[in-house]
Amino acid sequence: MSSDSRLRLPYLSDRDLRGSWPWLAGGLAAVAATGAFAYLARAIVKKRRVDRVLKEFHDTLIVPTPKLKELCGEMLNEVQAGLRGDKSSLLMLPSMVDILPDGNEKGDVYAVDIGGTNFRVLHLRLSDERGQVAHTDLRDFTIPEEMYSCHINELFDLLAVRTVEFIRDVRRDSPSLEKPLVGFCFSFPVEQTGLASGNLIKLTKKFENAGAVGADPVLQLAEALERKGMPAHVSVLLNDAVGTFAGGRYMDEDIMLGIILGTGTNACYLEKRSNIRKGRLPDLSHSEGMLINTEWAGFVSSNLPLLEEDRTLDWHSVNVGEAVYEKMVSGLYMGEVARHILITLIERGRLLGGKVPDAMREPWSLETRFMAGMHTDNTLLLSEVSAAMYCLYGVGPWEMTYFERRQVQEVCRLVCLRSARLIAMGIAALLKQMGRDGSEGPAPRTAIVMDGGVATHYPAHKDMDPESRLL
Ligand code: BGC
């Protein structure tokens, strides 16, 4: 509209106006259409620019299936090297668990579980009926931020206080003077020296507590419980992947693989005695073999689809240069990878007008649960994407075109897809190791049990890419 016409409009009389309605309406419609057209044209040009950068990300993140099969072979080699005790990025730790639950276990047990974003205390009453749990009590606590870097005794003291409160509450209904039987699920790499003893090799995820590495977590928990007034019998030390496997076996005897996909990642499977050539193992002549805690989080290969953004993330993590695979697939990191990619899209592709919102520069500000929400938004105008971008980064809905929302969603989808494909690759490698990949005729029924925040709260993750065949 010219400034001239804008000036003249107020001087038109009613009569003039009456005769002019059709013209006026037509003119306004034309102006609106021109404006809309210009807006659309600008949005399309912008979209193309961002799409070009997105395509580069797609090509690096989503490796073609043949390449993924190569990676699978490499992981299998690492599995075998680790079992021999040779140098390997997979620690392949014998769990000392060689007798698996068969569903006939009974009685009251407590469990303490730490290693992710929460810690849990649990009470189970196993039923007289095979494979049934008669009663469960569970209490979940978020780990306060300062507990990730305090001395390990402080963390164990907090754990002990909550455990003692919990056991006292459970026992209020059925008092007992016996020392409680506690299973300890400790989700870090431990060199086990027995079923209820071992030495912590390293901390992972966000934990960096002094006094932990090299010590026996069972002793530390038992001492903390005693300090808090409840001596207990800590009867077993399990990694969460091992616990997930064993728990799965209680329900289904065809479970062959236990996987954790939560804050971190790990896998556990049953290995034949003859294949484990490291560590001092108990006599396994009466069992199927032993559960192996693979610690696949550490898998590394030059063929992994790593981005510059992954390297930046690594640099800001507590375990620089370690847990390479975990940082590409698990819940602590996926949102952070997506945040770094978004920054690149803004800086290189001029998404959101090329201006990175200040809040987006804040490390770890895009948690994977928000990424999952944006990824699975199926509203017509992607209003969930828009709401998340507004709440997290102050980008108003009016500041993002529909195409931009789609592009933000695509970033989330790509990060999730990379994770899903890499996890599938890891599963395929372990199925091969167990001879359950179908390469020697039809494989017997093989069940996999999965746990962890991504596995349970990000359902789209397991539905990604159903077409690809790795086996
Ligand atoms: C740890 C594993 C653990 C996994 C899942 C990884 O960072 O190294 O021991 O099982 O996280 O919690």
Image (cartoon, rainbow, N blue to C red):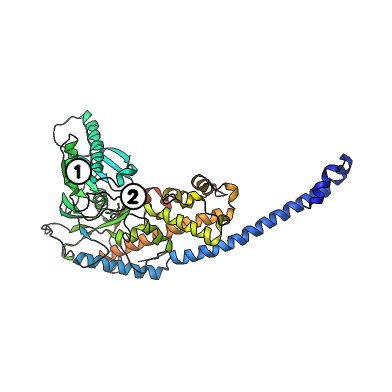
Identify which residue, 240 or 47, lies in the foreground.
Answer: 47
Q: Tell me the crowding category of disc 2: few under 14, some 14 to 19, or many 20 or more residues within 10 angstroms, Cα based.
A: many
Whether residue 403 is visible here, answered yes or no, is yes
Kindly identify the residue that appears in the image at 39 percent across and 47 percent down: 457
Kindly identify the residue that appears in the image at 39 percent across and 71 percent down: 66
Identify which residue, 319 or 64, lies in the foreground.
Answer: 319
Q: Position of residue 252 (x, y in %)?
A: 26, 51
* Residue furthest right as drawn: 15
Q: Position of residue 149 (x, y in %)?
A: 30, 47
Q: Secondary structure at mark 2?
A: loop
Three-letter amino acid code of the residue under disc 2: Gly
Kindly identify the residue that appears in the image at 47 percent across and 64 percent down: 58
Of the two numbered discs 2 and 1 on the same chain, state the one appearing first in sequence.
1
Compared across the picture, whether 129 is left or right of 412 comes to left
Whether residue 464 is visible here, answered yes or no, is no
Q: Is label 2's Cβ within 8 Å of ligand 1?
A: yes
Q: Is residue 257 above or below residue 120?
A: below
Q: Position of residue 377 (x, y in %)?
A: 50, 49
Q: Position of residue 33 (x, y in %)?
A: 72, 54
Instruction: Write down the quadrant of residue 443 in the picture.
Output: bottom left
Compared across the picture, whether 395 is left or right of 175 comes to right
Instruction: Write down the quadrant of residue 299 in the picture.
Output: bottom left
Task: Identify the mark at residue 266; answer none if there is no mark.
Answer: none
On the rendered image, what quadrant is the C terminus found in?
bottom left
Kindly identify the residue that appears in the image at 16 percent across and 49 percent down: 196
Q: Is residue 440 above or below residue 260?
A: below
Q: Nearer the viewer, mark 2 or mark 1?
A: 1
Q: Which residue is mark 1?
A: 221
Q: Which residue is mark 2?
A: 452
Three-letter amino acid code of the residue under disc 1: Leu
